[in-house]
Image (spheres, rainbow, N blue to C red):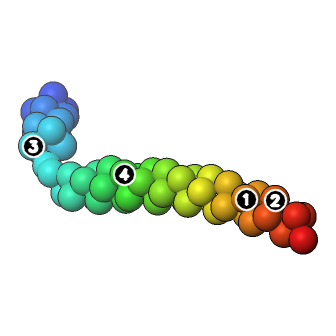
Amino acid sequence: MINSILKYRIERFTRGNSGAVTVDWVVLSAAVVALAIGAVNVILGDVSGLANAIEGVMDLF
């Protein structure tokens, strides 16, 4: 009796896919965050270089 109930619950658990969509969204969200962090790093690097170049030109005056 207990074995059949346990077997039924294990089978139901392994066949269930109720959390699969959540996992997909978590992976997708993590990828978007990683891309955003990469884009911010690229933009900040370019802005720092540009600011240094402007500072160099302004020091000439």
Label 4 or label 2, whichever lies nearer to me, is 2
Upstream in sequence: badge 4 or badge 1:
4
Write the residue at 48% across / 57% down.
39
Quickly name the residue at label 1.
53
Quickly name the residue at label 4.
31
Residue 14 appears left or right of 54: left
* Callout 4 amino acid: Ala
Question: Badges 1 and 3: C-beta atoms under 8 Å apart?
Answer: no
Give the CA separation, mark 2 to mark 1.
5 Å
Q: Is residue 37 visible?
A: no
Quickly name the residue at label 3.
15
Write the residue at 49% across / 51% down.
38
Residue 47: x and y in percent read 64, 62
* Callout 2 amino acid: Gly
Q: Which mark is residue 56?
A: 2
* Callout 1 amino acid: Ala
Question: Badges 2 and 1: C-beta atoms under 8 Å apart?
Answer: yes
Q: Height in image: 22 above or below 6?
A: below
Residue 50 appears left or right of 23: right
Q: Height in image: 3 above or below 55?
A: above
- Give SS at disc 2: helix
Upstream in sequence: badge 4 or badge 2:
4
Q: Is residue 42 visible?
A: yes
